[in-house]
Image: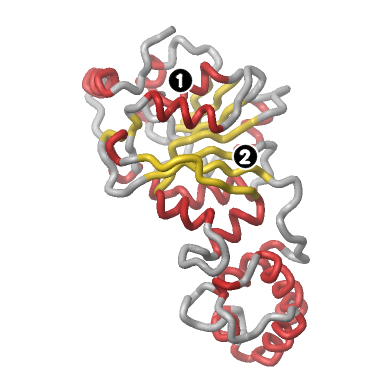
Amino acid sequence: MHKDIATPNRTKEILKKYGFSFKKSLGQNFLIDPNILRKITDAANLTQESGAIEIGPGIGALTEQLARACKKVVAFEIDQRLLPILNETLAPYSNVDIIHSDVLKANVKEIIHERMAGIEDIMVVANLPYYVTTPIIMKLLTDNLPIRGLVVMLQKEVADRMTARPGTKDYGSLSIAVQYYTDVEIVMNVPKTVFVPQPNVDSAVIRLTRRSTPRAVVKDESFFFQVTKASFAQRRKTIFNNLSSQLPSGKEKKEAILAALEQANIDPKRRGETLTIEEFARLSDQLYPYFQ
């Protein structure tokens, strides 16, 4: 068994050896607590037949735990300076592929197809860079990938928004987008002290399990998301006012919006944050014909 990469001393040694300095622009915060890394890995319920996709492996601390737990790890790293470090730290593990690429620009589906042929159970497991957490998660959910789900570390406030229920202050279009595709739960909260450098915010690990079918059936998904976004544009406004001011030519279509709200059995005076996903689905289906 090799010495864990993630101990504070070993991390310091590696960074010093390569003269590595953290780039704020890449949101680099490395975990230095092997126990937390093992808990993240455990939360993904991997077996020796599973595959793991990692984003932002850093110096390989989580990658190493994943490599021990599953059959194949494919990790996307955007920072060229980390490639030689990963080459060294992960040398003991032959089941890891590092891809030098921005995951937001990568064809992840194709890469899974090429690098994980024959693997049926695939999870995304990552300590995500905070500045780009939401776009990455949305891309992975909407790209129709053959994955069981995601276990990711992110800002605690973003985790709270993703898991929020209707009628709470954290509930918004992000809660709906994530819960439309997945069942989501917070696995644990993580203090700042287990990172180097320490971030300014607290973190949480969440598990998103893909649903076999979305939580609601809608005529047009992109229009459904357009309606939910519009409904939260200004939180103090009623759903009717938000839709009228935010939907394309909504001001001219106020009558139609009122009619759609009535058909969907939703009081126009309600606020967006009180509507469930099912109510948004009904509403967007009623609005759809008027906005084509």
On residue 64, which mark appears? Answer: 1
**Picture coordinates of residue 21 (x, y %)?**
24, 32
Q: Please identify the quadrant where the N terminus is shown.
A: top left
Helix, strand or loop at mark 2: strand
| Residue 230 visible at all | no
Q: Is residue 145 above or below residue 286?
A: above
Residue drawn at (75%, 72%) of the image: 285
Q: Is residue 8 above or below residue 174?
A: above
Residue drawn at (41%, 42%) of the image: 189
**Picture coordinates of residue 266 (x, y %)?**
68, 80
| Residue 144 visible at all | yes
In this view of the protein, which residue sits in the foreground, 99 or 212? Answer: 212
Q: Which residue is mark 2?
A: 149
- Image-quadrant location for residue 283: bottom right
Q: Is residue 186 left or right of residue 177?
A: left
Q: Earlier in the sequence, mark 1 or mark 2?
A: 1
Density class for disc 1 (Cα within 10 Å; few <14, some 14-19, many ≥20) is many
Q: Is residue 8 above or below residue 197?
A: above
| Amino acid type shown at disc 1 | Glu
